[in-house]
Image: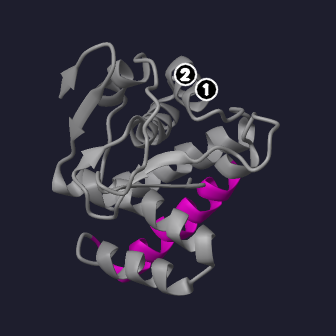
Amino acid sequence: MTTDTSRIAVLLSPKTTLVVDIFRSLGDFEASYDVGAIDALEYRLTAATDGQTARAVVSDALLLGFSLRNQRTQARMPQPAWDMNMIGARRASTDECAVLGLVAASKAGETALASRCARRLAVALDKTVSSLARDMGARLEAAGMRIESRDWAPLVNQRPTPTSDDGSGGRRSAARS
């Protein structure tokens, strides 16, 4: 990880990439409501855990994703997109780090960090979001994909930097959760 005032670069482990890909896949699903994106995600998760746990992870992720989207605090429509990388990318955006931080902090009961992560995503951290994020953390842990809040806390303190999507950086922007 490198940090300066303008940019954060985070290289994810393969297992953490799979966790982030859960939320990236939800963005694909929301963009087209193609169940194939969810099926592909579930299939990829079965490489790390059993089929029943993979289905449960996807189910929890869908609930959390929709809740995050519905709790956006910015009034203008359409909502500004969260910065998400392509599925399989090992580099994490600041929004992706904030989602991981929210889940990890909620699981650990660290409400101050969870609140900072939610603010970074422009999401109101209510009881529903907090509970769903905590459940997601527990489900990931049961699937052998534990994420720790201490790994993400320093990243949410950085100021967000606008990114331009000119198609050359492998990034995509879509309303994601």
Residue drawn where x is 64% and y is 60% of the image:
63
Residue closer to the observer: 14 or 74: 74
Q: Position of residue 89 (x, y in %)?
A: 25, 57
Q: Position of residue 45 (x, y in %)?
A: 32, 72
Q: How far separated are the C-alphas under marks 1 and 2?
A: 5 Å
In the image, residue 73 sits, relative to residue 25, either above or below, namely above
| Dominant secondary structure, magenta | helix
* Three-letter residue code for mark 1: Arg
Quarter of the rendering containing residue 60? bottom right
Q: Indicate the secondary structure of the residue bearing disc 2.
A: helix
Q: Which mark is residue 39?
A: none
Q: Position of residue 155 (x, y in %)?
A: 35, 24
Question: Quick check: 30 left or right of 126?
Answer: left
Question: Quick check: 11 left or right of 136?
Answer: left
Q: Are marks 1 and 2 in contact (CB under 8 Å)?
A: yes
- The residue identified by callout 2 is 116
Residue drawn where x is 54% and y is 45% of the image:
82
Q: Position of residue 125 (x, y in %)?
A: 68, 32
In the image, residue 137 sits, relative to residue 75, either above or below, namely below
Question: Quick check: 74 left or right of 130?
Answer: right
Residue drawn where x is 27% and y is 55% of the image:
17
Is 140 inside the magenta-drawn segment? no
Density class for disc 1 (Cα within 10 Å; few <14, some 14-19, many ≥20) is some
Is 54 inside the magenta-drawn segment? yes
- The residue identified by callout 1 is 119
Q: Is residue 139 visible?
A: yes
Which contiguous range is marked in magenta?
49-67
Protein image colouring: one colour
Residue closer to the observer: 14 or 148: 14
